[in-house]
């Protein structure tokens, strides 16, 4: 299901239900379809619709506004007081009331953004505050609350007049809706709203002022609520304390029923307009059918739940289809050349970036100690070190994410204080971080130029220029990506390409690449290295961070090694080899890994003809007790999809799975776990760990039954269990109470391993277990896997690292385009990385 078809399906369902509602109401209540009733219904809908347009911006940004009804009432009361008591003319009263609405929205925005209070709490509170002010302003005399009658004809014509037969509020609603649609679609602000709602951190890293955007959406919501209050007051020729009461539910219903996600980042003003018409029609119809008013909120609430369920259902279906049809650019070459190329030359005396004595402390933990580093103009400078050595902290200081505690940074010889990521970009420093940070709901082109969109008018995006600039960047990089495709539809490798294109598009003089090849195929790596060499030749300085030492030695001029937050050495790349770099990184020699013993037991897991349309087809193999079976192939070959299917995460279309020579049905992870299967996903942070929880909570998560009685946890037993596995796999620091978010990648992977090991699995599926971790941690992970195999655990090792597969596996399967194309069951000494590569790219034997 393509993105557009998902949205179309949602639109079709809403349209069909809406039409059915109109048909039913027209049939059972003939007066419903009269022109007079239709116009009256549209007028009443307009008040909610205008508020909903403003609130849509709030929800798209990831917030919520429960105070819209109270802002409407308070705005109406302010306007009435200005006209009646202060004798202000109609136009001035309207302007001041809109300004009051903006200030109310600004208050919400400040409380949310400056004080960090959740939007639900803030707007729930201000809903009561604003409503209280309405009652306060309604007191004519102590103890009495009266309506304020209005007689200004100019003001009364605003909400009570007509253009032809059409009531003025309808005209205002149409105008507001059109402006909202155009502004959200074509303005930089609209793009930033989607960006903040989809991925706040990524938006900030792209130079978007998140606080400003999230404040502005509340101001916009306040203005729209104030406009509705003005129109309503004008139409009634008075104001009451009950105005807008309960409209919060109507506004949220209009937005959600229209198809905008309550979670933010997906939806549109056009959808909200349809939702408002739907809610207005339902309200009008129920009234005509004689349904008591106190039952109407129930109907609206049921409608909200149904719409939210539809949105969630379609999103799940879309995600499933996306997994089956990932966009992965395939090379047209038959053979992939090796990663070779001459280094460019540079002048070491022309220093672009000079880091002097940088230190950084988080609480009592010293992360960086007196770090000094120089990068010359046009130099490719590699920074390596174990996880936790301080690399990420150093580059975050360089990009303004963190502030240093000591030391200074000189850029082209001038001292600078890098205040934030946007400031870093303005200084010519660009970065591609290890954690992908694209905006899922934005296109490839908009992601590449996020925060730097060309405009035709102030604040209005020039889409043609945006596409041209994005296309020029991709052509320069030789990346073949669809500009219009949403980034959420891309494969991991293609997302990495977009991240790289985004960094290179900023015309930076210094580019930081943090593990840029982690998810790229061999062909994509060659393109990247070619681009790095071209940039180096043009005088761009590159800081290259990678755990793949072959790449480090191939592409870099200079290598700096960090260990425990300190610089160990800075040496020319030609003076180093892998063994020397490893010694500097870990401070010791690492023993050579040995292939697991060839002896294996009876089959534990057997897969016969397993097929999932669009992902893999006719997969058959067996996995024996005590065996490590390697499964390899390029990104997008179907390896990870196969693992997910065996673990019950994704349904299969054909084939069967046998455990211990008995057929089993695995329809969910719970079923897989019941049968003794464990799965380490390639995405440990999103699918393997709960990042805000402690090591103890993560380790015990899959085995809570063993540390609880009748659903009540025994914390002492949970702690004992966690300590046992923390010590067993040597997690550092060895404190089970520490949150896993603060651990290095290698230690996070050990926590995931521990989570499954405490269940004593019979089958262990590990998908890319060493991606993004250093050589020392890899060595430890390898030892753990060897030890498990010796204990009789059957291990399916999935990896795109051919050297790793050859080092660890007894037998090897190679996949291409969803099928097994090469089986290596014997003659292991005759298998090489070249053999596996040729099979993976289409030149192996099937």
Image (spheres, rainbow, N blue to C red):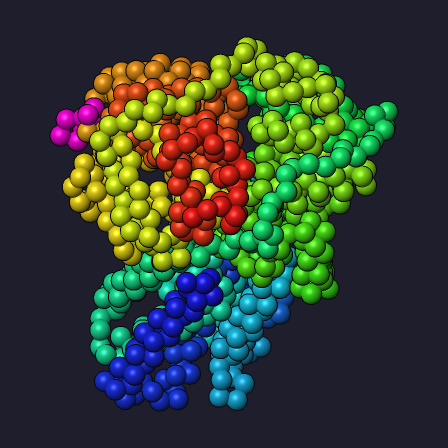
Based on the displayed image, in which of its 4 quarters is residue 523 positioned?
top right
- Which residue shows up at 69% across the image and 32% down it? 555
Instruction: Decide if residue 57 is on the left or right side of residue 541.
Output: left
In this view, 639 is above or below 386: below
**Residue 225, position as x, y percentages in the image:** 49, 61
Q: Nearer the viewer, residue 712 or 53?
A: 712
Q: Residue 187, percent across and down?
A: 63, 61
Q: Which residue is located at x 25 percent, y 38 percent?
A: 605
Q: Position of residue 345 (x, y in %)?
A: 82, 32
Residue 469 placement, left or right of 746: right
Quarter of the picture containing the N terminus is bottom left
Please provide the residue range marked out in magenta.
Answer: 706-713
Visible in this render: residue 554?
Answer: yes
Looking at the rendered structure, the number of numbered marks drawn on it comes to: 0
Q: Relative to the observer, which residue lies in front, 530 or 199?
A: 530
Q: Is residue 267 left or right of residue 285?
A: right
Residue found at x 52% / y 22%? 775
Q: Is residue 708 rendered magenta in the image?
A: yes
Residue 59 seen: no
Q: Is residue 381 magenta?
A: no
Height in image: 5 above or below 838?
A: below
Question: 612 or 760, which is in the foreground?
Answer: 612
Name the residue: 69% across, 49% down.
477
Where residue 324 sits, quadrant-wise, is bottom left
- x and y percentages locating residue 548 in the rendered image: 58, 29
């Amino acid at each position: 299901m393509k993105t557009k078809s998902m949205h179309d399906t949602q639109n079709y369902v809403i349209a069909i239900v809406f039409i059915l509602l109109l048909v039913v109401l027209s049939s059972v209540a003939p007066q419903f379809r009269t022109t007079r009733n239709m116009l009256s219904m549209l007028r009443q809908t307009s008040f909610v619709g205008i508020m909903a347009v403003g609130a849509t911006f709030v929800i798209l940004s990831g917030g919520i506004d429960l105070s819209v009804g109270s802002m409407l009432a308070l705005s109406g009361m302010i306007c009435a007081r200005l006209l009646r008591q202060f004798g202000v003319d109609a136009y001035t009263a309207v302007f001041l009331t809109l300004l009051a609405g903006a200030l109310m929205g600004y208050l919400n925005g400040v409380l949310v953004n400056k004080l960090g209070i959740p939007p639900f709490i803030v707007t729930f509170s201000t809903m009561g505050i604003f409503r209280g002010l309405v009652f306060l302003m309604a007191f004519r005399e102590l103890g009495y609350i009266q309506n304020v009658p209005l007689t200004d004809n100019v003001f009364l014509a605003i909400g009570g007049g007509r253009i032809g037969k059409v009531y003025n509020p309808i005209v205002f609603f149409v105008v507001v809706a059109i402006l909202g649609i155009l502004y959200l679609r074509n303005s930089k602000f609209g793009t930033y709203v989607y960006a903040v709602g989809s991925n706040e951190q990524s938006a900030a890293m792209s130079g978007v002022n998140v606080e400003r955007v999230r404040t502005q959406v509340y101001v916009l919501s306040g203005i729209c609520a104030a406009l509705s209050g003005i129109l309503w007051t004008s139409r009634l020729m008075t104001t009451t304390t009950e105005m807008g009461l309960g409209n919060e539910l109507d506004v949220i219903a209009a937005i959600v029923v229209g198809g905008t996600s309550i979670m933010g980042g997906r939806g549109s003003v056009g959808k909200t307009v349809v939702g408002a018409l739907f809610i207005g029609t339902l309200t009008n119809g129920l009234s005509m059918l004689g349904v008591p008013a106190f039952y109407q909120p129930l109907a609206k609430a049921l409608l909200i739940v149904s719409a939210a369920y539809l949105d969630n259902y379609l999103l799940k279906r879309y995600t499933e289809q996306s997994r089956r049809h990932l966009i992965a650019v395939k090379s047209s070459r038959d053979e992939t050349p090796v990663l070779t190329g001459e280094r460019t030359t540079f002048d070491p005396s022309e220093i672009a970036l000079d880091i002097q004595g940088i230190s950084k402390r988080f609480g009592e933990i010293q992360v960086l100690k007196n770090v000094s580093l120089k990068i010359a103009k046009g130099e490719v400078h590699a920074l390596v070190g174990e996880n936790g050595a301080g690399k990420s902290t150093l580059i975050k200081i360089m990009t303004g994410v963190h502030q240093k505690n000591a030391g200074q940074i000189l850029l082209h010889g001038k001292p600078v204080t890098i205040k934030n990521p946007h400031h870093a970009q303005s200084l010519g420093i660009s970065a591609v971080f290890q954690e992908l940070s694209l905006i899922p709901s934005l296109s490839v082109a908009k992601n590449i130029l996020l925060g730097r969109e060309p405009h035709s008018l102030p604040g209005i995006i020039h889409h043609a220029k945006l596409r041209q600039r994005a296309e020029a960047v991709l052509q320069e990089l030789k990346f073949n990506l669809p500009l219009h495709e949403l980034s959420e539809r891309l494969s991991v490798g293609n997302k990495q390409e977009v991240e790289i294109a985004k960094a290179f598009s900023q015309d930076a003089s210094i580019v930081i690449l943090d593990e840029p090849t982690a998810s790229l195929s061999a062909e994509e790596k060659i393109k990247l290295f070619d681009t790095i060499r071209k940039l180096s030749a043009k005088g761009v300085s590159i800081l290259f961070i990678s755990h793949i030492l072959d790449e480090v030695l191939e592409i870099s001029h200079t290598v700096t090694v960090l260990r425990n937050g300190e610089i160990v050495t800075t040496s020319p790349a030609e003076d180093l080899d892998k063994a020397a770099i490893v010694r500097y990184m870990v401070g010791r020699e690492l023993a050579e890994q040995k292939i697991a013993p060839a002896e294996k037991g009876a089959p534990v897991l057997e897969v016969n003809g397993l097929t999932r349309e669009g992902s893999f087809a006719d997969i058959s193999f067996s996995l024996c007790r005590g065996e490590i079976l390697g499964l390899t192939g390029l990104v997008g070959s179907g390896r990870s999809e196969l693992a997910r299917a065996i673990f019950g995460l994704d349904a299969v279309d054909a084939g069967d799975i046998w455990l211990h020579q008995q057929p089993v049905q695995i329809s969910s992870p719970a079923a897989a776990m019941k049968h003794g299967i464990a799965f380490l996903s390639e995405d440990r942070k999103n699918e393997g760990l709960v990042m805000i929880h402690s090591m103890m909570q993560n380790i015990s998560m899959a085995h809570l039954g063993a540390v609880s009685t009748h659903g009540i946890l025994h914390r002492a037993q949970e702690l004992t269990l966690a300590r046992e596995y923390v010590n067993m796999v040597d997690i550092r620091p060895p404190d089970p109470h520490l949150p896993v978010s603060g651990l290095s990648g290698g230690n996070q992977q050990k926590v995931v391993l521990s989570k499954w090991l405490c269940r004593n699995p019979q089958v262990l599926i590990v998908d890319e277990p060493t991606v993004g971790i250093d050589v020392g941690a890899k060595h430890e992970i390898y030892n753990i896997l060897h030890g498990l195999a010796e204990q009789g655990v059957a291990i399916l090792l999935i990896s795109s690292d051919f050297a790793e597969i050859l080092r660890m596996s007894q037998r090897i399967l190679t996949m291409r385009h969803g099928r097994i194309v090469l089986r290596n069951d014997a003659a292991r000494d005759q298998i090489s990385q070249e053999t596996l590569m040729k099979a993976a790219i289409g030149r192996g034997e099937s």
